[in-house]
Amino acid sequence: MDPLHFCIAVVPLAVYLLMIGYLNFGGRPFVTTGTRDAAALGIGLAGLVAAGPMILFFPESAASHFGNWVWVMLLAFYGLFVSMFVLMMRPRIVIYNITAEQLRPVLTSVAMELDSKSRWAGNSLLIPGRNVHLHLEPTNWLKNVQLTSGGNQQSYDGWRVVESELSKRLKDYASGPNLIAFPLLITALGLAIATATWMLMDMHGVAAAWEELRRY
C-alpha cells in the first residue's frame, strides 16, 4: 500500500478514535442516540471502505464515461447504504463515560418523572405512559451503557424525550475520566503521526498514487 491510500484509509478512523477518546477523557457522561453513534462509526470507516472494497471493485467501464465523478457516485452510494442501515435500526441511546450503577438511579428518576407507573424488571425498564420499553446493556471495559429497544412497539417521541431528559440530568454529573480514553487517543495520534511521516518521506509515492487515482 502506498502512503496516499494509507492516508485515505486511516485518517477518518483516526478522527473517529480521537473523538471517542475525547468524550471518554472529559470526565462527564455524554448522551447520544444510536442513530448518531452508528452514523459517526460509518463515517469513521469510510476511508477503509474507499481504500479497500471501492478500489478492489472499481467500475472502470463507468469511470471511462463519467471520469472522477464515479468517486462521487461511489461515496454517495456508501452514504446511502449507511443511512439506510441507520434508519432501519431500533431506537437506542448510548451514554459514554458512565457505569450502569451510576446511570440506573438517574434513569429511574427520569422515568418516574415521565410516568409514575414506570417499573424495572431486572435490567429492563418500562415507561408505559411514553410507550418506551428499554433494556440496559453496560459495556464495563469501555465504561459506557446502551439503552436498547425491548420490542418493536416503541414510541420514537418517547425515546427522544428520555434522551433529552437524560442529557439534562447528566450535564453536570461528574463521573471521572475513563482510562480507555488513553489508548484511544494514543492510537489516533499514532495513526496521524505515522501517516504524516510516511507521506513526507515518500512524496514521489504520494504523487504517483495521486496520478493513478486521477487516471480512474
Image (cartoon, helix red, strand yellow):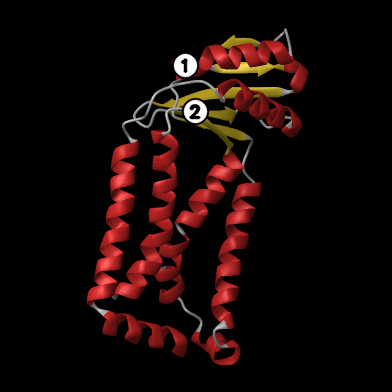
Q: Please indicate whether residue 95 sits to the left or right of residue 184 in the image.
A: right
* Relative image position of residue 163 (x, y in whole percent): 64, 29
Relative placement, left or right, of 68 versus 126 is left
Using the image, tell me which numbered label, if any, was put on residue 119: none
Q: Is residue 70 above or below residue 76?
A: below
- The residue closer to the viewer here, 76 or 152, is 76
Identify the residue position indicated by label 2 in the image.
Answer: 29
Q: Secondary structure at mark 1?
A: helix
Q: Are marks 2 and 1 in contact (CB under 8 Å)?
A: yes
10 Å neighbourhood of mark 1: few (<14), some, or many (≥20)?
few
x then y, percent, for residue 99: 43, 21
The residue shown at (45%, 69%) is 50
- Mark 2 or mark 1: name the one nearer the start of the chain: 2
What's the residue at 47%, 79% (across, down)? 58
Residue 56 visible at all? yes
Residue type, numbered disc 1: Gln
Q: Residue 125 location, x and y as percent?
A: 61, 17
Residue 43: image location, x then y, percent: 51, 56
Q: Under tag 2, what secondary structure? A: loop
**C-alpha gap between disc 2 and disc 1:** 10 Å
Pointer 1 residue: 102
Q: Closest to the observer: 164 or 121?
A: 164
Graded by Cα atoms within 10 Å as few (under 14), some (14 to 19) or many (20 or more), the crowding at tag 2 reads many
